[in-house]
Image: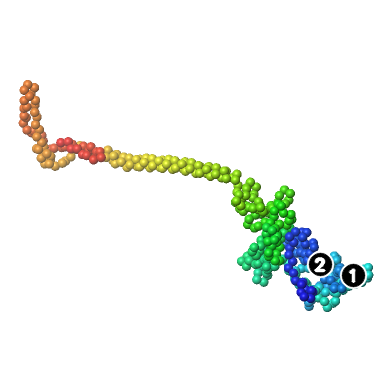
Amino acid sequence: MTIDKRTLTMTIPYSLHKNSQKAFPVQLITRHQSQKPLIRLDLNLIQCANQTSLNWTSVESSSTLRGEFVRTVLTEKNIMYLSSGVTYLRNLTSTNCSTKTVYRTDNKELFQVKFKIESTLNDYCSKENLCYPIDIYQCDHEQYRCVCRSPLQSYLTSDQHSICVHAVKNLSQCTIKHVRCLEWCHLNSSATVCTCPKDLAQKKFSNDNRAYCEGRRNGKCDSFIQCPLGDSCIHGTCQNTNGKLHQLLSFDMITISIIVSSLILFVIILILAGSVYMLRRRRWKKHYHSSIDPVYKRRQQTNLPTSSDYDNIIYGVFRNNVQLSSRILSSNDDQVTDTSPFTTTESPSYHPKIVYLGGEQQLTAIYA
C-alpha cells in the first residue's frame, strides 16, 4: 500500500490448499490447468473514512488512465474478478435500500491495483519476462524456465500447481521472510499441509490418511524420516537386515556359478583344441600320402630296361678284376685244393642286368 492508501501492489500466491484462502481479500481462482487463473478481489478493501463497512454494488474500471472507464454491476456484492496487470477503479457505488441512500466515491479519486500472479515451476521466462516473486524464483536462462532459489524446494498444491516453499523440521526454523514455510510430515504432527525434504525422503500416507516422510534404502533416517517397509534405522541409516543374509547367499551362489561356468568352458576349449589338432593331423597325413602315391605309381609304370648298352670296356675292367677262387674241402684230410684263376671264354659282348630297388634311398642294382 502507498502512503495515500489508494494504490495496492501485490504478487498473489497460489493456495496451498483449496480451503486456505477463504479468509483472504485477494485470491486466485483456477479455471483450468492450461489457463491463467483469475484474481478475485474483495472491494471491502476500499471504505469511506466516516462510514461503516459498505457493500459496493457497482464500479467503474479501466486498464489505463487515458482509456474509457466501463461500469460493472457486481452480481456478487463487493466481489470483482480481474486479470493480472494494472487496473484503475473509480466511482464505487453502494445502495442502501432501507434508507434509499446511494453512496459513491468522489469522481476524482482513483484507486490503482497492480496485481502479479505467482510464477510456477517450468513457467516460461526471459530477461524481459521475469519470475515472481523474484526473491523466491529465478530464471534458468539455459532452459528459459522458472526454478526455485536455494534452499527452497518444489511443492505440488491441491490444484496441481508446482510452487516453491521452505521445508523445515519445526516452524521455529522459518527464517526466510515472505516465503511460505512448511513443516516436515510426521505421524505425530497435526498439520494437514506438510512436505518432506528434497532428495532425502518422499511423502507417504498411512492407513488413517496421515502423512509421513519415508526415506530411501541406505538413506538417512531419524525421528522424522522413517525407513521403507522391511528396513530398520541403524545408526541413522536405513538398512535391510533381512536382506543381508540373502545378499551373502546370492553372492556365494554367483561366485560358485562363475567358477563352475569357467571350468565347463575350459573343458570345452580343451576338447575343441584336441579335435582341431587331430583333424589337422589327419589332413596332413592324407596330404602326405596323396603326394607320395603318384610318384610311386609313376615309378612302377616305368619300363625298366632288361639290358643296357654300357661301355663293354668298363665292364671288361670290372670283369678282369674279379677273381673267382674255389676251395674244395677234402672230406679225408681237410686239404684245400686251389683252383685256377677265373677265366671265361664268353663272348666279348657283355649285357648286365639293371634292377631298380626303389625305397627312400632310391637304390639301383647292377647284376653283372
**Amino acid type of disc 1?**
Thr
Residue 103 x/y as whole percent: 88, 73
The mark that comes first in sequence, 2 or 1, is 2
Mark 2 crowdedness (10 Å alpha carbons): few <14, some 14-19, many ≥20: some
Q: How far apart are marks 2 and 1 (CA)?
A: 17 Å
Q: Which residue is drawn at 94% across and 70% down?
A: 99
Which amino acid type corresponds to the residue marked 2 in the rendered image? Asp
- The part of the image, by quadrant, that contains residue 293 is top left
The residue shown at (42%, 41%) is 270
The x and y percentages for residue 290 are: 33, 41
State the residue position of label 1: 95
For residue 112, side relative to residue 293 (left or right): right
Judge from the rendering whether residue 232 lies leftward or rightward of residue 52; answer left or right.
left
Is residue 81 something that shows in the picture?
Answer: no
Q: Where is residue 253 in the image (x, y as percent from the top left)?
A: 53, 42
Q: Look at the numbered disc 1 and give the secondary structure of its residue.
A: strand
- Camera-side residue of 55 and 223: 223
The N terminus lies in quadrant = bottom right
Tag 2, which secondary structure?
A: strand
**Residue ranking furthest to the front:** 172
Q: Name the residue under label 2.
A: 42
Which labelled disc corresponds to residue 136? none
- Residue displayed at 65% across by 57% down: 197
Of residues 71 and 52, which is closer to you in this image?
52
Vertical order, 134 against 300 (above or below): below
